[in-house]
Image (tube, rainbow, N blue to C red):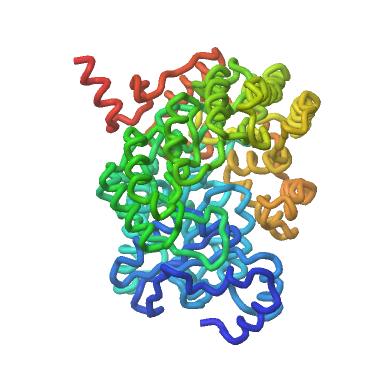
Amino acid sequence: MINVSKLEKCLKKVNKPARYIGGELGTIHKEFKSNTVNFAFCFPDVYEVGMSHLGLQILYYMINEVEGYSCERAFAPWPDMEEVMRSEEIPLFSLESKEPLSAFDMVGFTLQYEMSYTNIINMLDLGNIPIFVKDRSEEDPIVVAGGPCATTPEPLADFIDMFFIGEGEEINVKVMDVVKKGKEENWNRETILKECAKLDGVYIPQFYDVEYKEDGTIASMKPNTEEAKPTIKRVRVENMDETFVHDRQIVPFMETVHDRAVLELFRGCTHGCRFCQAGMLYRPIRERSEDKLMEIAQNLLKNTGYDEISLTSLSSCDYTQLMDLIHKLVEKYEKENVGISLPSLRLDSFIIDTLKEIEKVRKSGLTFAPEAGSQRMRDVINKGVTEEDLMRVAKSAFDEGWSKIKLYFMIGLPTETLEDVAGIADLANKVRTVFFNRPKEDIKGNFQVTASASCFVPKGFTPFQWIGQDSVETFYEKIDHVKKDIRDPKVRFQYHDPEVSRIEAIIARGDRKVGSAIYKAWEMGQKFDGWSEFFDFEQWNKAMEAVEIDGDFYATRTREKEEFLPWDFIDIGVSKSYLWKEYERAIKEEVTPDCRNQCNGCGINDCSMWEDFHASKN
């Protein structure tokens, strides 16, 4: 254990000391013992962000339910705390037992966002764990990583011993079982890793050799030990009613990004948006039953004391029993003033009925995602909504008393022109017109429409994984094009930093060589790159230049169909041939139907859409 009295003195010198003390409602304290398998769940961002992550809450309780296993938490310390820790020689520690990370058997990072990768290196360094796999000894923890970005793992291959490919409920405890047996039988590190490599969903980079062609693309990637599989299959939960039930949450002492109870309705998405990595990774749809959700909701509210519950999923409005579920929740908890929120809203008339039910307790904000300014572009990305949908829903919402609305867009989508981009301002201005073109007596509230644009980053396992990203200069040209068409102060335009998106694309599309740039950037002082006050584009460019990484090769280059992509050794279930077919349909501006209406043969043969479709053919 670290010196707690020294820590207490340090906490008086930093902002928000509640980030580092632990002891919140709902925490589990197990004795830190040598015969226990001790797992440190590390979130590579600040406490307020990490504590809003559902996956952390699920795995924390799931692991701690197992006898002989413990899971504790660690977060990236804010720079003021890091400075004090380094000056006082306090290693990065867990919140529960205050043990340094180096004392754990396993140290696990969740990979939610590529711009957190320098924080991973920084946390290993602060935790006194050798940064590179090759430098770790038998006494060092096994460093693992999971989450959505683990499906494109190669940029972190030099730093992570083992990647979990898939949903944590299906793999974390199985790997800990192997580590437990290894501790009991005194296996060495390599033996433990080789035994883990036999499991589905486990990727261990050191057991694979990568060769490159003269043009820098990958020639081959082959296992160098018999235990390693040539293809890593992504694992998933099959039945959401039968998997581990998340009916508790740790309740922080301080405000976090999402300060509410979280009820997960289902996993997966059937819309097939071509830019969306999560929509491909989390296929097929797996819903929780309404009765199970009501039971979980009751326990969540009882165990946390929250007065708001968020119905979360990739597209929550697609839950087949949503209206009935919301009605039951409102009916049961309205007297207790428990609010219901939906993080994502669908552009159809059904959503207004849903919102009217929710507002019986309190009115929530309105956020819709047209994603693109023109109908042509919405067809390219397979969004499946029209301008008429947006205007109809906006008018209905305004008639019901809402006066503020947010619209999410992307800039830099494949085949996009300046005319398409101009549609962003045009849609926002039309929403304003809808609000004010109503009878005077109906116009109430302080109207505001906010158009928010992110810069498109092509991601692996999407139909756009072959396409090149716009240059930073092109992004700014398109942003300026939108700005000039927004003149009304009641119409706001916000946009994501194109320079951050450039680095994100380099990492997201990167191979093992990109890891040298991440390490060099960290050496040059980069961390918290997802925070605007810390990101330094010039430093990143210098880091890439120092290690001879060509950013254009990874970000803006268009791949050929036959190229072996750095993540092609992973099988997520969706076939590469289907993704290419969808890419071709995008170029032709052809829309693919929602999976609930027609099976499109994505490659996942064991889903209900596939079975129902083929049953109807027989």
Residue at (44%, 69%) from the top-left corner? 25
Residue at (32%, 43%) from the top-left corner? 328
Query: Looking at the image, which residue sits at the far bottom?
Result: 5
Work out whether 103 lies above or below 356.
Answer: below
Quadrant of res 213:
top right
Residue 386 point in image, percent of width and height:
54, 18
Res. 583 visible in picture: yes
Quadrant of res 14:
bottom right
Quadrant of res 477:
top right
Work out whether 239 lies above or below 261.
Answer: above
Residue at (37%, 57%) from the top-left corner? 300
Res. 131 visible in picture: no
Work out whether 166 lies above or below 491.
Answer: below
Q: Nearer the viewer, residue 436 or 351?
A: 436
Residue at (29%, 32%) from the top-left corner? 607
| In the displayed structure image, the side of residue 222 where residue 544 appears, left or right | right
The tally of labels here is 0
**Quarter of the image containing the C terminus?**
top left
Q: Nearer the viewer, residue 427 or 302?
A: 302
Query: Looking at the image, which residue sits at the far front?
Result: 441
Q: Nearer the viewer, residue 89 or 512?
A: 89
| In the displayed structure image, the side of residue 499 where residue 369 appears, left or right | left
Residue 138 point in image, percent of width and height:
46, 72
| In the displayed structure image, the side of residue 124 where residue 24 appears, left or right | left
Residue 579 point in image, percent of width and height:
46, 26
| In the displayed structure image, the side of residue 299 where residue 341 appears, left or right | right
